[in-house]
Image (cartoon, rainbow, N blue to C red):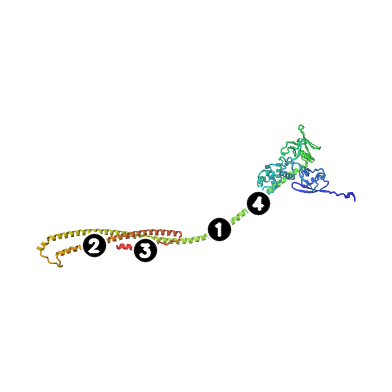
Amino acid sequence: MSILGLKKKQPKTFKVKVITMDAEMEFSCEVKWKGKDLFDLVCRTVGLRETWFFGLRYTVKDTYAWLKTEKRVLDQEVPKDSPITFHFLAKFFPEKVEEELVQEITQHLFFLQVKKQILDEEIFCSPEASVLLASYAVQAKYGDYEPNFHKPGFLAQDELLPKRVLMQYQMTADMWEEKITAWYAEHRGIARDEAEMDYLKIAQDLDMYGVSYFAITQNKRDTDLLLGVDAQGLHIYSPNSKLNPNKSFPWSGIRNISYSEKEVTTFTIKPLDKKKDVFKFYSSQLRVNKLILQLCIGNHDLFMRRRKVDSIEVQQMKSQAKEEKARKKVERQILAREKQMREEAERAKEEMERRLFQLQDEARLANEALLRSEETADLLAEKAQIAEEEAKLLAHKAAEAEQERQRIEATALKTKEEKRLMEQKMREAEQLAVKLVEQSERRSKEADHLKQDLTEAKDAERRAKQKLLEITKTSYPLIAAYSPPPPPPEGGDLALGSGSMRIDFKDSDMKRLSMEIERERLEYVEKSKHLQDQLKELKSEIESLKLEEQQQQQAGVYSLRNEARGYPPEQPYMPHSNRNSAYMAQMAFFEEV
């Protein structure tokens, strides 16, 4: 076996993994490929024609480097991994994005890269600008804001603001979303490419946009400076401030940049104005020095290229891009018109559906109202029947009440008549009592007169007896001497004796008469007292009858009211027959008296 046969066979290809801002791709490359072959393959795959802004970046130890196009890939200090990883990124940035970025894919890649640098805080951005840029990013991703579709919380999974901004203010995620949505709602009608371009136009005015920073020293011992390389020129910064440069050298004012490799690499910037001092700075890392030189040469070439007439290729691209934008604009207008028509149709459909639902609800309500009206009609008919029966019952009760009223009126009239008769009889009884009293008084007076007359008669009799005795005593002897004795009376008594007995008879009659008169007077007085007592009892009975009559009248009125109101009638008042019979008996007694 020959020595050549013992050698290991070398592979003819190697694998490469290329990571863009929105995709990952793997390629199988030939060993002899240069960096330009791989770069062109990636650009063709992506569809990118503005290749001068981009490059393939790889990591070397603690720094990074850009793949050189004129050298073979494997001859450079690329990682030995398999596959070899490259990042397809923008290496140079335009001065004015709106004028220099032609293709939509170029704008999109720049938009994604700048957005990532802002979120990673490689580019400083104020909170207000961060919210505005976030609203354009949301517009580019979600399109026009639709309140019915974009509900609160739809941005919860999106990274839109730098962490520094989120920590600077004590605000919740919902509050940040509300602020972003307020701006987002104002971007209606902006297409995705327009939103991304508006994002880049705001971002290009930021101080750190497109600047690559490197640590340098102004002398061999100091390390307190930063070198910034961008599309405008070279800038010298303090280590703690990347926003405001201490000194700037625009590309238009630089005559020459020299580079010498000795113990320490020295860069010399010679201004175009010879009166200005030459600026020198030092860098100790060889890879960093090469990177600085590459960026200076590339940015300067682009700076000079921008100030020349565009090449045929660029003019064709701009023309095609202009036509493409015009075509897309027309398509967007047609789409917007169709969208508007569709929205109007959907609104009309929703309106018709709403109207249909409304009519269905109205029909349902009408049916329910009809059913309720039928039920109400049945209920009203039943109520009318009940009311008619109640009316009949009330009419019957009214008739009964009228009869009861008439009966009570008749009873009242009868009671009034009885009362009138009673009062008349009472007046007659009072008159009779007065007459009896007067008669009694008159009889009493007559008895008194008779007593007086009797007393006078007794006095006269006593005087007459006395006088007779006196006459008898004086004249008795003469009568006995000169007068013959009279014949004896048939009675057989003497005249004197007869006269004496006549006197005795008259005295006994007078006593008997006096006793009868006194007895009669006492009887009249007793009857008079008894009559007065009966009159008093009669008056009290009359008063009680009056009270009972008033109560009877009130009970009759109350019964009428209750019957008129539908209450059950009470028991009618019945006159007290016993009291009336007693009263009539007393009146008969007085009539007899």
* Vertical position of residue 539 compared to residue 245: above or below: below
In the rendered image, residue 240, in percent from the top left (x then y), is placed at 72, 39
Do the residues under discs 2 and 3 have CB atoms within 8 angstroms? Answer: no
Q: Is 562 on the left or on the right of 505, as rendered?
A: right
Q: CA distance from mark 2 to mark 3?
A: 43 Å
Residue 372 is labelled as 1
Q: Is 57 on the left or on the right of 6, as rendered?
A: left
Q: Is 532 on the left or on the right of 408, as rendered?
A: left
* Circle 2 residues within 10 Å: few <14, some 14–19, many ≥20: few
Q: CA distance from mark 2 to mark 4?
A: 141 Å
Three-letter code, disc 3: Asn
> What is the quadrant of residue 298 in the picture?
top right
Q: CA distance from mark 1 to mark 3?
A: 66 Å
Residue 578 is labelled as 3
Give the residue displayed 64% in from the left and 52% down from the top.
350
Q: Nearer the viewer, mark 2 or mark 4?
A: 2
- Which image quarter holds the C terminus? bottom left
Residue 515 is labelled as 2
Q: Nearer the viewer, mark 1 or mark 3?
A: 3
Front residue of 16 and 385: 16
Which residue bears the numbered disc 4?
A: 346
> What is the quadrant of residue 190 in the picture?
top right
Give the residue displayed 31% in from the left and 63% down from the top.
589
* Circle 1 residues within 10 Å: few <14, some 14–19, many ≥20: few
Look at the numbered disc 2 and give the secondary structure of its residue: helix
* Vertical position of residue 16 compared to residue 370: above or below: above
Earlier residue among tags 1 and 2: 1
> What is the quadrant of residue 551 in the picture?
bottom left
